[in-house]
Amino acid sequence: GQNIDQPTEMTATEGAIVQINCTYQTSGFNGLFWYQQHAGEAPTFLSYNVLDGLEEKGRFSSFLSRSKGYSYLLLKELQMKDSASYLCAVFTGGGNKLTFGTGTQLKVEL
Amino acid sequence: EADIYQTPRYLVIGTGKKITLECSQTMGHDKMYWYQQDPGMELHLIHYSYGVNSTEKGDLSSESTVSRIRTEHFPLTLESARPSHTSQYLCASSETGNEQYFGPGTRLTVT
């Protein structure tokens, strides 16, 4: 089976940097996704890591270590609009399915 | 920008009614998915399809059924709605199976 863990909630200050961690235990790992989901809305794609290392995309970066079953999402220069739930999802190619974690609710304060 | 649509966006319906939630995409994606998400909870895959006439059940058992007669269309049906079916239903599609584009969701309430 699949097991994905991420913190339930985090709080950070506008303009700061925040790191959201995700650990996973899966079979047939074929990549890890981060999605952003605002309350009442659909998830939107942020990043995809399939190899170890850091992927940078503007204010957002995502890191993966397959040997440790670990990923993090780094958000820089936080803005109020970044307040949302951040979902870690593992892609298991054998079943062509995404398994989602429960999400980390990020609150950005002034 | 992804072009995937769901209707209705909101639905309140009585117990025992039959309902169909519509999902359409104009990207020509072969792979489509239905997820169920309760407020503040994770997304659970309930159905997926790899192409026309292909449907599979997901990780979470669901009393709903799906069909895939056309590539662009992946409707979900509940034959007899119950209060336990109250949830948000999200449809997604993908070209490769990994990056998935989500529709806006249908928020269903069964009274």
Image: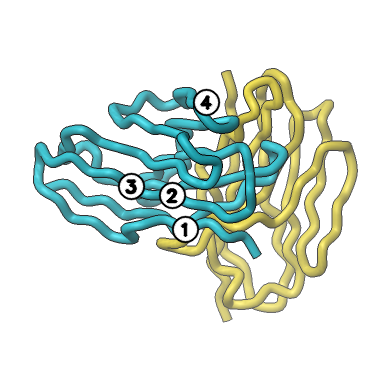
* Same subunit: marks 3 and 4: yes
Single out the mark in the foreground, 3 or 4: 4
**Residue ID at (73%, 26%):** A29
Label 2–label 3 contact, CB within 8 A: yes
Total numbered labels placed on residues in the image: 4
Task: Give, as a three-letter code, the residue at label 2.
Answer: Cys
The disc, 2 or 1, on the residue closer to the chain's N-terminal end is: 1
Write down the residue under mark 1: B5
Q: Which mark is residue B21?
A: 3
Residues at badges 2 and 1 in contact (C-beta under 8 Å)?
Answer: yes
Q: CA distance from mark 1 to mark 3?
A: 11 Å
Q: From mark 2 to mark 4, how far is it between C-alphas? A: 16 Å
Residue occupied by mark 4? B54
Quadrant in which the N terminus of chain A appears: top right
- In front of the other: A40 or B31: B31
Q: How is the image coloured?
A: by chain
The residue at 31%/54% (across/down) is: B107
Look at the numbered discs 4 and 1 and tell me whether their residues touch, using CB distance below 8 Å.
no
Task: Check disc 4 and report its element: helix, strand or loop.
Answer: strand
Q: Earlier in the sequence, mark 3 or mark 4?
A: 3
The x and y percentages for residue B103 are 49, 55
Q: Is residue A51 above or below residue B56?
A: below
The residue under label 2 is B23
The chain letter under disc 3 is B
Question: Where residue A109 appears, x then y in whole percent?
Answer: 56, 75
Q: Residue furthest bottom?
A: A110
Please state the chain letter of the residue tagged with numbered disc 4 in the rendered image: B
Residue kind at label 1, given as amino acid type: Tyr
